[in-house]
Image (cartoon, helix red, strand yellow):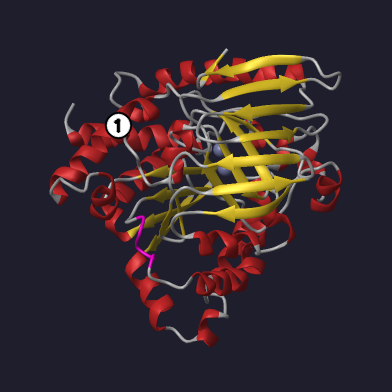
Amino acid sequence: MSFEENLKKYAKLLIRKGANVQEGEEVNLSIAVEHCEFAHLLVEECYAAGASRVVTNYYDDYSAHAFLEFGSADEHAKPGPTLAATDEWIGEKRPCRISITGGDPNAFADIDPSVFAVTSKAASPLVANARELTSTNKLSWLVASAADAGWAKAVFPDLTSEEGVAALWDLIFKITRVDLPDPIAAWDEHIATLKRRREYMNEQQFDRVHYWNEEGSDFVIGLPKNQSWASPGSITPGGRINLHNIPSEEIFCAPDRTRMDGVVVSTKPLVENGTVIENLRFTFADGVVTDVTADTGVEIVRELIATDEGSAHLGEFALVPHSTPISQSGVLFYMTLFDENASNHLALGSAYAHNVVGGTEMTPDERLAVGINTSAIHVDFMVGSATTNIDGIAADGSVTPLFRNGEWV
Ligand code: ZN
Ligand code: ZN
């Protein structure tokens, strides 16, 4: 397969299987200027699938960085001029939202974290429709990635820019199963495996799990009553299957926001606000972060936790065996979409409403009352490893081994 052929197969997988764009639907594509050639393939595939209108929002890390660096504090505190109109359109038309990530993971490392806090606070009310409709799956959405020189330099620091980008694309094609003769059939099989695990967890309805490993994690996390585990393809906005992430290797649930106790040690660096955060370590009591340390970037995490009431609680608990294609590659991607799918992970902040039965029909306050967290942030961090053990604990105290040495029992 030539690079061009694989890229076309990848575009087709994202639009037809991932976002599952429908006849007559509007699409909002968010993608970096570096990826404009790939954007053109995606746009073509959207129209081929019957999209009525594709609105492409090109973003540019350089311009965004310049604003944060040179813009005044007054301007940082104002939302961007097009945000309100975009959010109104999303509220009205519920377009399929496709976001392509990439770029240098350290692009914003020199920006003071408090500046991010100010700009995201300013934007928060003007992305309310997008946030609520996405978290309750009232529209179709997809996050996937494209290779570029900035990202490749972080993953393959010893290669030239050109070699690095080529190597990163090869890995993306392999991990997303695009290098197989029929990627869509391969995804159907993969989805079926994850569905079996999801159904098992939903049948068991564990009250809590005990999680421990040699890296130093040892915690007990509560699961809500009527918990509803999700896996790729289990969410069906308007009755159609939509994968939210490509790649995706996880099944996940919302924890009970009030029941998390113990120590969590991250097993991979976290990239947040363009900064690499290494060796993150949290202590939790009664569901709340009581202490956090890290070797680098701890200030970013402290700002995040202080965003709002829900940002110091957890919103996601995801199970990923250590033997996924991403783990096997042995590559650290410095990108959550890839690194989280190589590893069990937790997320600080908002939970997905569908993780409790009937949740998408509840108000945020009703969700809080049943233990489902809400926040303006959702930040995943990786906690899985080859030494991880997990036990499911039922309400009567009986214990079922779920993971041993990083794999499903
Ligand atoms: Zn996840
Ligand atoms: Zn997440």
Identify the image quadrant of the N terminus: top left
Q: Residue at x 60, y 74 (%)?
A: 122
- Is residue 49 among the parts visible in the rendering? no
What is the x, y in percent for residue 340? 48, 38
- Residue type at the position of mark 1: Phe
Regarding residue 247, the answer to whether it shows in the image is: yes
Image spot of residue 113 (x, y percent)? 50, 69
Which residue appears at 21% of the width and 48% of the height? Answer: 157
- Examine the rendered structure and indicate whether residue 100 appears above or below residue 50: below
307 is higher (above) or lower (below) than 369: below
Q: Residue 197 is drawn in which quadrant? A: top right
Q: Residue at the location (39% across, 28% down)? A: 327
User: Is 85 displayed left or right of 143 in the figure?
Assistant: right
Per the image, is 107 magenta? yes
Identify the magenta region.
Answer: 105-109
Residue 3 falls within the magenta-colored stretch: no
Read off the residue under disc 1: 173
Quadrant in which ligand 1 is drawn: top right
Label 1 packing within 10 angstroms: few (<14), some (14-19), many (20+)? some
On screen, residue 218 above or below 150: above
